[in-house]
Image (spheres, grey):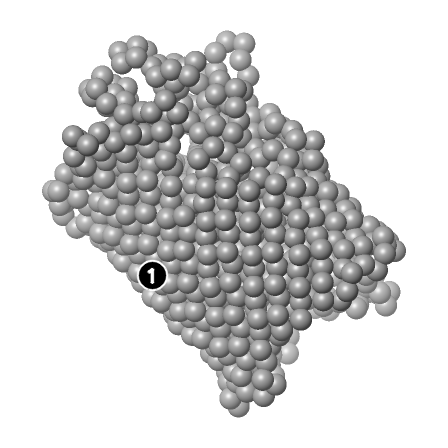
């Protein structure tokens, strides 16, 4: 897609505006029945009619999420939201990487993050690495999901490709009991329980909890999680207040990738083990809304978060590969402690032709990270067995802190009938301070400051019969994380992802997005939307190669590019409802350079594809309300080929081999039956055809060719490793509402 495609989209919006000036606006009655108000920042406010926004927002409410039949939030978004994909590297539904337009929100430390995620206005990207721990979200308490596209500056740091905003339920919005239990044939058991109470006068309360146990469809993949969310809220005069508590704990197994040979033999196998992550979170949020009048309000939030993460990984010993150790395995552990506090305030006012918003945010955090390793051996099943004679050695560690403040302002201005101009800007100031330790030797503390003013401007125009067109230009930034600053010196390279060595300066990433499109909304909820976009990341932070084998460092990469088209449509006719979404994504490097991808150097040029992202994604859904009590449906998700990480240049694969991740289509069925108003039985089948597919691939060194450990000194060959997709899964559940 060339520059002219974007230019054509922008001209479409302006041409639509000019055309509408010449033609009278005539709306059928059915097209004016629904007005949806959308927030324009992480904290709630008066909001703006979504048709007046110069970009296409996607939303989903609790009722639609309830129909997901026990699926996780990530699985729900990948099936329902346009442009959203997941991979199954870990095999756990709560540890998947989620990408939107090629930008990631991942629980994997060291991943390049590009999406900001909020729960009730509190940023949940963890300060160490900007990771998102999906297992720590209280899914039973989520009331709505909003996905805003592009580098919208109002959503703060790390909003390079978009922002995901989650809001919680309350006793007023969801009074009564909601109990939901489900089970799958591959050993997953889940229970969600929620209860809301509304006094009808000055206060209301809500409590929700989730318990999940997973035997795992892959070997040695048992896991579990639990969380509890409680909210007490009330009103006094012109004020509304709430206090929300969240406690969560998990122990999940991520078995990772399999080499092709082992994958063909048994897709349920684990390459090496254990691969265990334990997370714990405690959070408290106090919120206050003051209504000055019906057109003006102020929202404020104060929060504190404390998280703890421990991991245990049984891996190949790199020193064994290089002939420097007789122990083929390494037993690696990490400990991470994070504390965060902050506040935010959001002022909104509707004043005649202007819908104004302004706000301020401040976040502070402290981080302590340490890793340890112990030389070990392998059991016959490739699990790591520790050698009691070997001592655990301290590896890299870091103590750090960060401060981030922001101030923003926005105005949606009705410049003419059915024409809205939106102008916004945000100023970010961040300070990151680190002290690294290696082999118990502390380095000097380093402190870096980052500042950036990010503007945005857009226009939306109604052109009649429920149609509107829009165009939007925006800019946002993200600052380097501790993990990136800790491995940024080419003279002291480290192993991906957490071999911290030194922390020289890295530039902040700046993303600029241009987007244009059109949308239509009918009176029965029928919709059509199309967006054409292009995002350029300048000074993107990627892992570069070093002279030492299997080592590298993070460095700024001049430009990467994400561009494409998103198309969605939904229609309801009688007892039938259908939805369609299609995404085209061209995510590429936009300059020449060399990257280190784990085992080899890859030379990229402008146009080289980023790994792990399909160019084409098609999602189809069809539901039939057979009776007032029975609904059945079918859905299809189809993806095109993806590039394997480490083979972006096509030079890693042996002659005659195709190391692409092949495209695939997955068919699913679902049904819901309500024998009585309070009861609902549901069932879902995913991957109905039991298709063998892969969701990600990377080039690695297979130390167990033909199932036997590689002899030390022998040259190990590179192989393609893949993330096996889940086989056919049958889920059934029961929901009771009172």
Residue 252: image x %, image y %? Answer: 43, 45
Residue at figure coordinates x 50%, y 9% from the top left: 655
How packed mark 1 is, by other alpha carbons closer than 10 Å (few <14, some 14-19, many 20 or more), is: some
Q: Quadrant of residue 57?
A: bottom right
Question: In the rendered view of the protein, which quadrant contains the N terminus?
Answer: top right
Q: Quadrant of residue 652?
A: top left
Residue ranking furthest to the bottom? 237
Q: Secondary structure at mark 1?
A: strand
Residue 685 located left or right of residue 282? right
Residue 453: image x %, image y %? Answer: 41, 58
Question: In the rendered view of the protein, which quadrant contains the C terminus?
Answer: bottom right
Residue at figure coordinates x 55%, y 45% from the top left: 188
Where does label 1 land, which residue?
306
Residue 682 located left or right of residue 245? right
Residue at figure coordinates x 17%, y 31% from the top left: 390
Residue ranking furthest to the left? 441
Compare residues 456 and 192 and report the one nearer the observer.
192
Q: Do we see residue 535 in this rendering?
A: no
């Amino acid at each position: 897609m060339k520059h002219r495609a974007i230019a054509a989209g922008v001209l479409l919006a302006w041409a639509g505006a000019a055309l509408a000036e010449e033609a009278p606006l005539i709306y059928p009655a059915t097209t004016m029945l629904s007005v949806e108000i959308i927030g324009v920042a992480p904290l709630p406010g008066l909001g703006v009619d979504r048709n007046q926004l110069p970009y296409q927002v996607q939303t989903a409410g609790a009722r639609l999420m309830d129909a997901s039949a026990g699926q996780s939030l990530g699985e729900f978004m990948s099936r329902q939201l346009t442009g959203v994909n997941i991979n199954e590297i870990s095999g756990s539904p709560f540890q998947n990487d989620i990408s939107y337009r090629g930008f990631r929100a991942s629980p994997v430390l060291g991943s390049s993050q590009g999406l900001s995620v909020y729960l009730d206005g509190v940023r949940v990207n963890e300060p160490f690495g900007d990771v998102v721990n999906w297992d720590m979200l209280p899914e039973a308490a989520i009331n709505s999901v909003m996905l805003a596209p592009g580098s919208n500056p109002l959503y703060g740091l790390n909003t390079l490709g978009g922002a995901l905003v989650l809001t919680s339920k309350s006793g007023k919005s969801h009074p009564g009991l909601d109990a939901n239990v489900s089970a799958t044939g591959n050993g997953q058991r889940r229970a969600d329980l929620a209860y809301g109470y509304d006094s009808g006068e000055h206060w209301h309360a809500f409590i929700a909890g989730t318990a999940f146990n997973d035997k795992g469809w892959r070997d040695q993949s048992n896991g579990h999680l639990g969380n509890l969310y409680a909210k007490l809220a009330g009103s006094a005069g012109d004020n509304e207040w709430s206090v929300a508590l969240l406690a969560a704990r998990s122990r999940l197994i991520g078995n990772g990738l399999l080499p092709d040979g082992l994958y063909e033999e048994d897709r349920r196998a684990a390459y090496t083990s254990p691969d265990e992550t334990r997370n714990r979170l405690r959070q408290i949020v106090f919120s206050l809304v003051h209504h000055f009048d019906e057109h003006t309000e102020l929202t404020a939030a104060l929060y504190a978060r404390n998280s703890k993460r421990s991991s245990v990984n049984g891996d190949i010993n790199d020193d064994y590969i290089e002939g420097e150790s007789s122990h083929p395995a390494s037993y690696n552990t990490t400990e991470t402690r994070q504390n965060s506090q902050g506040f935010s305030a959001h002022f909104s006012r509707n004043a005649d032709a202007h819908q104004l918003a302004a706000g301020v945010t401040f976040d502070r955090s402290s981080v302590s990270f340490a890793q340890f390793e112990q030389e070990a051996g392998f059991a016959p099943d490739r699990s790591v067995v520790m050698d009691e004679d070997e001592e655990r050695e301290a590896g890299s560690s870091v103590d750090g802190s960060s401060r981030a403040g922001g101030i923003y302002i926005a105005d949606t201005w009705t410049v003419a009938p059915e024409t809205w101009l939106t102008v916004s800007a945000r100023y970010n100031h961040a300070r990151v301070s680190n002290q690294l330790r290696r082999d118990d030797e502390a380095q000097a503390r380093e402190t870096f400051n980052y500042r950036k003013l990010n503007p945005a401007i857009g226009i939306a125009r109604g052109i009649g019969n429920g149609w509107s067109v829009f165009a939007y230009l925006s800019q946002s930034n993200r600052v380097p994380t501790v993990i990136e600053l800790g491995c940024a010196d080419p003279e002291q390279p480290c192993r991906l992802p957490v071999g911290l060595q030194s922390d020289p300066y890295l530039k902040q990433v700046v993303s600029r997005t241009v987007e244009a499109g059109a949308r239509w909304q009918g009176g029965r909820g029928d919709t059509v939307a199309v967006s054409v976009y292009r995002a350029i990341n300048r000074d993107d932070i990627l892992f570069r190669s070093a002279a030492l084998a299997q080592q590298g460092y993070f460095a700024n990469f001049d430009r990467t590019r994400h561009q494409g088209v998103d198309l969605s449509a939904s229609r309801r006719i009688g007892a039938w409802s259908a939805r369609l979404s299609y995404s085209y994504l061209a995510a590429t490097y936009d300059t020449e350079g060399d990257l280190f991808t784990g085992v080899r150097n890859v030379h990229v040029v402008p146009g080289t594809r980023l790994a792990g992202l399909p160019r084409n994604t098609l999602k189809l859904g069809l539901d039939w309300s057979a009776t007032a009590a029975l609904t059945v449906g079918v859905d299809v998700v189809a993806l095109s080929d993806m590039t394997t990480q480490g083979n972006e240049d096509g030079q890693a694969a042996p002659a005659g081999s195709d190391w692409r991740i092949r495209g695939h289509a997955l068919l699913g069925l679902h049904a819901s039956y309500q024998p009585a108003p309070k009861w609902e039985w549901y069932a879902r089948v995913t991957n109905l055809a039991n298709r063998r597919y892969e969701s990600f691939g990377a080039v690695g060194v297979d130390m167990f060719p033909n199932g036997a450990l590689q002899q030390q000194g022998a040259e190990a060959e590179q192989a393609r490793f893949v993330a096996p997709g889940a086989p056919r899964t049958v889920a059934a559940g029961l929901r009771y509402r009172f």
